[in-house]
Amino acid sequence: MKFKPIFISFFIFCCIGNCFSQETARERLQRRNQGQSNTNSTVELTSRATQMNRTQSTDINDAKWLREIYRYLDLSKEGNAPLYYPVLPEQGRMNLFTLIFNLLSENKITAYEYLDGREVFTDEYKIDFKEFLDRFGIFHETQNGNIVVSEVDIPSHEVLGYYLKEAYYFETGTSNYGVKTVAVCPIIYRQADYESQTVRYPLFWIVYDELRPYTLRMPIMTSSLNNTMTGTIDDFFRMKHYDGEIYKATNPRNLAISQYTSTPEEMKAEQERVEQQLRDFEERLWKGDTDTTRVLPYRQKQRAGGSTTMRNRRY
């Protein structure tokens, strides 16, 4: 008779254990299915991610010194490859354009029309996502009133470059010098009608502060030699790991470098001159010279020489 209570207790214990093991297996299956469904879509921002974006964002309106620089990032260069790969999403990773495309389709960020020579981030110049798809012939379907684009139809393989707007700034109150990514513009390469050569088509501008909460959490591989070297897309921009050539520095006449140079050699020399100006300013800061209104030595030497031509008066 003593064995009966022991047998009943053992039977109850087995039933309870079996219930817990079934529940655990069910939870694992749900987590796996949920993970698979989220692989190729963006996730909602947490309050922590939103707060992190606020701390990363920099207000440059009160900067004592500011220089706006425009660069072209060629994704065929090794240094910019992390923005291009993977072409198709894999293992929770996607390239920058796929991320932007998905966020636009989910109405989580805003894109603004690309206007030649200026950027206007107002409601008047917001792009309509469906109109954008139709204009570039991107296949899509409408399901339950929502626009759906298969990942294989996202033209990320055709986006081979970006325009990047930077702001170099110095705040005298905090003695803070830095570089802020202001906006990015994807560039798609396609063969024009009745032409044999490939043409660049700038798509739209995205204000980077709007994009940052998502780039903060999108992992990328930063080295082809050491695959353990990883970071995020935001790290890539914030630490200036990209390789971009200057095509414009903001100036009163709003001219790109190609508009006031005549030859490739002149254009290259002007790009190097602007790069040197940026380095010289930063170097003077660390030497204690914080007169941000001072003209760079390049022009001082020209003035001392007593002659200045219009061609020398570059911005």
Image: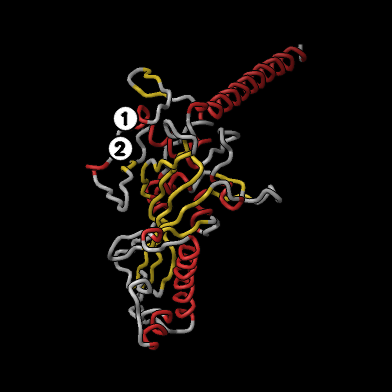
Residue 32, picture quadrant: top right
Camera-nearest residue between 273 and 132? 273
Give the labeled residue for mark 1. Answer: 131
Q: Nearer the viewer, residue 97 or 94?
A: 97
Quadrant containing the C terminus is bottom left
Give how far across and how far down residue 251 sits, in percent: 32, 65
Q: Which mark is residue 195?
A: none
Residue positioned most to the left: 124
Question: Which amino acid lies under the numbered mark 1 shown in the image of this protein?
Answer: Glu
Judged from the image, the secondary structure of the residue bearing numbered disc 1 is: helix
The N terminus lies in quadrant? top right
Mark 2 crowd level (few <14, some 14–19, many ≥20, 10 Å Cα): some
Q: Is residue 89 left or right of residue 122?
A: right
Q: Residue at x 35, y 80 (%)?
A: 308
Position of 128 compared to 42: left or right? left
Q: CA distance from mark 1 to mark 2?
A: 8 Å
Colour treatment of the image: secondary structure
Any part of residue 56 in sight = no
Labelled pair 1, 2 in contact (Cβ < 8 Å): yes
Q: Position of residue 154 (x, y in %)?
A: 48, 30
